[in-house]
Image (spheres, helix red, strand yellow):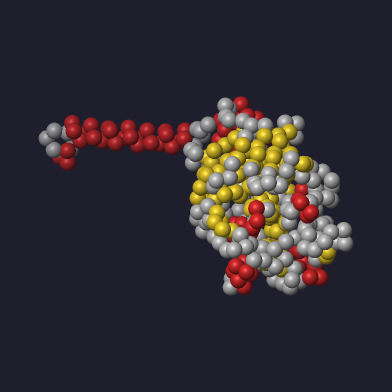
Amino acid sequence: MRLMGKNPVPVLLGLAFFIVMCVAVAINSFFGSFSGSREELLREDSRKKTLNTGKLQCPLDGALVDRLPQDRPVAVVIDNLPRARPQSGLTKADLVYETLAEGGVTRLLAVYYHGEASSVGPIRSARPYFIELAGGVNAILVHSGGSPEALELLKNSNFPHLDEFRHPRYFWRISQRRPPHNLYSSISNLHKLARDYGLNNEVKVPSFNFISDEVKEYIGEKKSLQSDEVKIHFPRGYEVTYSYDPEEQTYCRFVDEKPHLDAATNSQLSARNIIVQFVKTNVVDGQGRLEMALTDHGRALVFSGKKVIEAVWQKPATDRPTTFKTMDGETVELLPGQSWIEIIPQNTKVSF
């Protein structure tokens, strides 16, 4: 008692306050681990259910698979000129990017991880931004030649790529179309080529944030901006429209107001999710070649399940994935299925 001095009351009060605070922190910590929104609880529950099925979720499209592929993803540069349509193999891609190329045309980058296609093409040449997009998902870039800047970048780096000019026997050309719109390969050919040349290293593939049906039903009840149609005003002849199909919960794709078909299946291309990424874009030479600031941050629009989500994209380094977050700082949630990421200049009009 002598340690308290003559008046023990302040010390006792201080000790009592300390005990109360400790109890409060302990209670908050205990209940905090079980608290949170219904959305968070459902998401965690859905993850447990996914684990209980014994399946794994593909990081690029959210599909449940028995095991993740041993082969590294391949990202194939695909022609999108009118005489290259319909292309082959796009319905089998896990993820598809669309960007402008020189002259106001668009070109595609189709990424295959667990997706398999016996015919993919027409395959076209590389640009620097395709290298960066492939690097963001740890994929091997597949191309046929490239712009001088792209070829120089590939030459001076260790970036994994497969060029038809160097490995022609793994590719073929069809007689129904004229060069250069007639070059094809298969995903099995490309994986074999990657293995033969020691490029098929085991890598960690970054994952999008996919939600389950339970979470989807709850989120659908929340009030949000919605749209049945998305129109991206690329230059004439390449304008893209996505029309929402409520039964399939997908967006049917049209180019220049015509259904965009897959040659292998004769079915219309569709997307479960559409991400529109606005980037700083500049013309860099007399040929109209473009430079895109992909290692940066900016505005994005996400369309999923008819909802419209204002978002922010960020890519901190060339070898890091691009992240998409809501205006509240939460990672954007997508429905399982193929996503199309539309990379467009900042001044491109998008109607919805």
User: Is residue 2 visible to us here?
Assistant: yes
The single residue placed furthest to the left in the displayed view is 6
Where does the N terminus fall, quadrant-wise?
Answer: top left
- Please indicate whether residue 181 sits to the left or right of residue 3 in the image: right
- Please indicate whether residue 234 sits to the left or right of residue 181 in the image: left
Q: Where is residue 138? Give x, y as percent.
A: 63, 59
In which image quadrant can residue 242 be found?
top right
Task: Give the residue drawn at x 60%, y 40%.
Answer: 350
Q: Is residue 41 above or below residue 60?
A: above
Where does the C terminus fall, quadrant-wise?
Answer: top right
- The residue closer to the viewer here, 19 or 324, is 324
Q: Where is residue 54? Give x, y as percent.
A: 71, 46
Q: Where is residue 189? Give x, y as percent.
A: 79, 64
In which image quadrant can residue 155 be found?
bottom right
- The residue closer to the viewer here, 21 or 271, is 271
- Please indicate whether residue 330 sits to the left or right of residue 8 in the image: right
Give the mark count. 0
Task: Give the residue drawn at x 84%, y 51%.
Answer: 264
Task: Give the residue drawn at x 54%, y 50%.
Answer: 279
In which image quadrant can residue 126 be found?
bottom right
Q: Where is residue 65? Give x, y as percent.
A: 73, 48
- Please indicate whether residue 167 sits to the left or right of residue 176 in the image: left
User: Is residue 158 visible to us here?
Assistant: no
- The residue closer to the viewer here, 246 or 122, is 122
Task: Give the residue drawn at x 17%, y 38%.
Answer: 4
The single residue placed furthest to the front in the displayed view is 286
